[in-house]
Image (cartoon, helix red, strand yellow):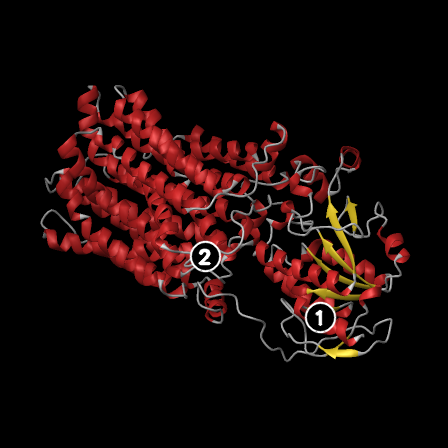
Amino acid sequence: MPSAGDTRAPERTSEAGAPRGNPFGARFVAPLYLGASLNPVNSSIIATALVAIAAALHIPVGDTAILISSLYLTSALAQPAAGRLAEEFGPRRIFVAGITLVLVAGIVGSLAHSLTALIVARVLIGAGTSAGYPAAMLLIRRRAEQAGHAAPPREVLGGLSITGAATVAVGPAIGGLLIGGAGWRAAFWINIPVAAVALFLALAGIARDLDPVRFGSPRALASRIDLLGMLGFGGSLTALMIFLDALPRLDWPALAAALVLAAALAGWELRAAQPFLDVRLLVANGALTRTYLRNGLTLMGTYVILYGLTQWLEVARGLSAYQAGLMLMPMGVLTALAARVVSRRAAVRWPLIACAVLLLVGAMATLFVGSGTPIAAVICVTAVFGLTSGAGTVANQTVLYQEAPAAALGTASGLLRTFGYIGSIASAAITGTAFHRGVSDSGLHSIAWVLVAISALVLVMTVLDRQLARADRHHTDQPPAGARNPGPAPSTEPTRAEPTRTELPRTESRSADMTTGTHSTPTPALDPARTALLLMDFQPVVLGAVPDPQGVLARAGEALAWARAHGAHVVFVRVALADKDAAAVPAHNKTFSQAVAAGYLTDGTAATAVHESLKAEEDDLTVRKTRISAFASDTDLRAELRARNVDTLVLAGLTTSGVVLTTLRQAADEDYRLFLLADATADPDPEVHRVLMEKVFPHQAEIISTADLAALSTAAQ
């Protein structure tokens, strides 16, 4: 059972078992890269089509700006929403649905004859392409877990960044080539073949989501995905973007609306059972919040150059849109190269510091750019920002992957993109303010001074962020990304176990890592005939909330096989609420009142059944509980154990801070001898798991691993 503080929706399992061969081969990553690139390429390719669209529809060029802002606004809202839906319904389903929507949008845009129809197409493109990145991040994490890897290969995450960052820079050049040769409709119909290829590759290369879609009642579904939170987030973000878009004119009503809606959103999310925007997480996890801010500010600086310098080149230097786009090609190439280099490094602090320094250098260099500056020098300035974009995007994505909760990676990844879009929209406001009286050298220099301030802030934030240094030290000690999880390492710290109730022969435990195995001090053997194995809350609704669900489930299966082979009693404990149980939950019970509101603990559903891999037999005992502890007052566990003459319990379950903690402490108070299978136990927060295993549980139980069970039972014979 999730701990009382865990109100996130459980993560869903996408594929069963470890994939064969190379889990991150081209067949798997190709559709992810292609799908994740659809959004940034559509963000930039439209820029070269605006003049042609205005001429074809006989409208002012200024009116076509809505085709840019509509995609930005839709993407900023849809990125985290798509991530949340991927967590709820499965990342492959959402990925495929998004690509299909892009395909439809390409058809709509290609056939459009009005600005309204083009706006509809751009909104559909924004919504569809927004599924690519957060779903891809979730698919990559799950593939790593299923393959038994500590983390995905760095090149995989780096490739995701490279495709996104590079396409932003090369988009104008590609757009200029397409529009010049095939007309403005090419900006829309190009999505049709690209989306078709991405859809084919996704269906062929990404395994199906195995969990069935769970809708439930409309009210329960709205609660699970926090529909009101999504709407509040969308409203506040829309008002903020209206304010930014109006600059340099100050739209005070829009700003007031943004602030009021943001305050209402925060109040709602603090009470929501499964918040869309986890305010508590953002406050508690400073490293994650700083990553969002750092990424948004860095991209703001990059986009200011991407858009501001492009306008300056076309107006002040007299270049065509296509020529201006070509000048940005070196920026795109260096973005890809920098991303590739940084993706091969485990450390992130120094790449992020270098990124901030380069941003500052580029900003100061822009101060010296003018109408007489050689084109080669201008290209060199853009190249600096290319290095900044590539290094910053990959490093910030790596920090996000490390810091975001596994169960909320989809939403967290979407929010990273949202902050980037806010940065890009703010950059448009900065450019519009600087050039509102005309595009000139002085306006470009005003942009450069704003860039100096932004880059200085990013540099200070990065240098003072101690968590980056701690994270680098931690990950330096970890196995390389893509390597399989290592076995437990020896420990020199003695275990302080309480005296046991029955003196039996003692045997030596093998493992020494109390987060995954046992300690090295002598451990009392157990008598299987007087022992019960408690497998607690191994249910789909709970499995999805912990890292490596397949691994912990497999080790629970090994413990079950040991119990069958040695004649130990088997008890399955599951949490589920019948209608009468749900009605009896008081509002002040935070954990279960939220579960009732969300409807994810409803008895009789597949989500609350014991996982199908753990097969019950006729002599096994199954206990349904309506609170966290297996010894909750509404269960008959005590009487059943007493009737079976059980005095020893072997515990395994989910989560460490939930059912395991409460059951172990209560069982200790009732004088049972206790063995805890650390490798068949997990928690959404690995640090909480570690602290309980190392600091708390050794006072009441012997901390062992499933591999120790055979030796312990043999010693008693």
Q: Residue at x 41, y 36 (%)?
A: 98
Q: Compared with residue 703, is residue 316 higher up or lower down, i.e. above or below?
A: above
Q: Mark 1 or 2 closer to N-term?
A: 2
The residue under label 2 is which amino acid type? Arg
Q: Residue at x 66, y 76 (%)?
A: 510
Q: Are marks 1 and 2 in contact (CB under 8 Å)?
A: no
Question: Label 1 is placed on what type of residue?
Answer: Ala
Q: Quadrant of the C terminus?
A: bottom right
Residue 440 position by quadrant: top left
Circle 2 sits in a helix, a strand or a loop, which is it?
Answer: loop
Confirm whether residue 673 shows in the render.
no
Provide residue 333's location: percent of width, then percent of height.
22, 54
Residue 400 spot, x, y in % from top left: 46, 54
In the rendering, at what x and y percent does residue 287 appear? 49, 57
Packing grade of label 2 (10 A; few <14, some 14-19, many >=20) is: few
Q: What residue do we see at 27% from left, 54% from top?
A: 335
Q: Nearer the viewer, residue 185 or 274?
A: 185
As drawn, the label of residue 20 is 2
Q: Position of residue 123 (x, y in %)?
A: 37, 29
Q: Is 328 left or right of 618, judged from the image as shown?
A: left
Crowdedness of circle 1 by 10 Å Cα count: few (<14), some, many (20+)?
some
Disc 1 on helix, strand or loop? helix
- Residue 268 shows in this picture: yes
Report whether 706 appears left or right of 588.
left
Side of 706 relative to 251 (left or right): right
The residue shown at (18%, 28%) is: 52
Q: Please name the residue that numbered disc 1 is placed on.
A: 710
Q: State how many labels appear.
A: 2
Above or below residue 242? Residue 459 is below
Horizontal relation, residue 221 to residue 589: left or right:
left
Tell which of 359 and 705 is nearer to you. Answer: 705
